[in-house]
Image: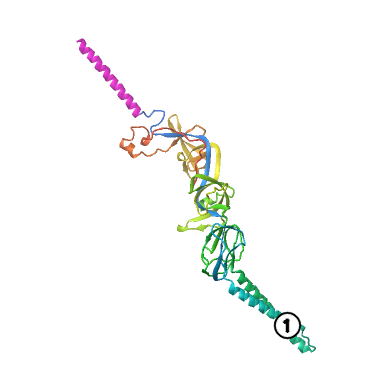
Amino acid sequence: MRRGRRAWLINGVLVVALVAAGWGAYTFLWPSSNAATPTGVRSVAATRTDVVETVSAAGSVESSYTGTADFATSGTITQINVKVGDTVSKGQQLAKLDDTQAKLQLAAAKSSLSAAKENLANASTTTTTTQQGQSSQQQSTKSLQAQVDQAEVSVDQAQEAVNATTLTAPGDGTVTAINGTVGQKTGSSSGGGSTNGSSSTSANSSTSSSSTGFITITNLASLQVKANLAEIDVAKVKAGQDATVTLNAMPDTPQAAKVSAIDLTATTGSNNVVTYGVTLTLNTPPAQLRPGQSASVAVTVARADDVIAIPSAAMRTVGTSHTVNLLLNGQETSRAIEIGVRSESLVQVTSGLNVGDQVVLPTAPATSNQQERGGGGGFGGGGLGGGNVRIQPGGGGTGR
C-alpha cells in the first residue's frame, strides 16, 4: 500500500515537471503579444556619425596634354630622330623627309627673284625726256615690281615646302607612338599640329591623314582622370570638390583627388544617354599611373559630420514627407522626421529623433534554410530575429 502511494507521488511530480517544462518552451518559442519587443521586429538606435553623399562614375586616366604630329607634305621618310619613350621639347626635330626636290624648287625660286630684282633695277636707271616715254617707263616699272613681288611669294612658298620636310614636336612630353618607318612614303593633309588637352601648340606639322598621326607626344608628368557623369548628377558637382579615384590596376589603394573642371556641353552616347565630362586631378599621383588605365570615381558632393543618423531603409518617404516607426515600450508608433544629407545607406536626421531612439527596420525575407526549418519557430520575422542592430560610428557610406 505504501509502495503504491510512493509510486503515485513520483508520477505526480513527473507530470507537474513535464507540464512546467512544456509551458516554459511554449512561452519561449511563442511569446505572448504583450511582450516588451514584438515578435520579428528589428530595430536600430539613432546615433551620431558622419554622413557623406557622393556621386559615382566610371573614368580613365588621361594626359592633360597629348599632341599628334604629321608631315605637311608628301615624300619619303629619310630620318626618324626619336624613339618611343624619349622626352622631347616643343619645336624639337622628330623626323625628316627627302628634301632634294623641295630644295631644288627653292633654289629656282630664289634665282627667279634675283632676275626680277635685276630687271627692276635696270629699268629704274633708264631715263627718258619725253612725256610719252616717262609714262611708258612708269608702266614698265610697275610691271617689273609686280614680278619681283610674285617672285618673293614663290620663294616663301618654296621655303615652306622645305621646312615641311622636317617634323617637329608640337609640345613638351614623351613620345608614346611612332606610326611609320624610314623609307616609307607619307601623304599630306592640311592644318596644323593636332593636340588634345589644355595646352595649345603650333608646329611645323599637320594633322595626320590617319586618326593617330605619325608621332604622338604625351605629357606623362601631368596625368588626370576623365569621367562621364550622368546628367542627373552633374548639377551637384563643382570644381574644387574632394573625390576618391580607385584605379582598376590598384584597387586596394584609393587615390585622393579634386574636381578640376566640368564640361559645359553634354555628350550623347548609346541609347541616348546624356553625360557630362568631369576632369579630376590626383593629389599625389602614384608612380604606377599610366594613360588609359580604367578607374571608378566618387565625388563628395555633400557631407555632415557627427550628426544624428539612421539607416535609409528605416525611413519611408511620401512626396516630400519622411516618417519612421519608433519602438516605444514594445509598441510601434509613427513619427515624422526632417532629413539632411543622404548617403547610399544612411540619412541625416535634422529633426524628430534623438540619439538612442529605436527605429524599426523592415523585416528581411527568410532564407531557404530557415524556411525548411519552419521559419525558426518565432525567433523573429523570417528567422532573422528581433533585437537591436548597431550603426558603426564614422562610417557614412557612399552615394550614387
Q: Tell me where residue 182 appears, x and y as whole percent.
A: 53, 66
Q: Tell me where residue 378 appears, x and y as whole percent.
A: 35, 32
Is residue 352 something one can see in this rendering? no
Q: Is residue 247 left or right of residue 385?
A: right
Q: Tell me where residue 314 appears, x and y as whole percent.
A: 45, 38
Say if 17 sits above or below 310 in the image. Answer: above
Residue 285 magenta: no
97 or 256: which is nearer to us?
97
SS for dot 1: helix
Q: Tell me where residue 327 appears, x and y as whole percent.
A: 45, 32
Q: What type is the residue that disc 1 sits on?
A: Thr
Residue 12 magenta: yes
The residue at 25%/16% (across/down) is: 10
Residue under circle 1? 141
Indicate how the structure is coloured in the image: rainbow
50 or 201: which is nearer to us?
201
Q: Is residue 145 left or right of residue 105?
A: right
Q: Is residue 116 left or right of residue 346?
A: right
Is residue 246 something one can see in this rendering? yes
Identify the magenta region: 1-30
- Dot 1 crowding, Cα within 10 Å, few <14, some 14–19, many 20+: some
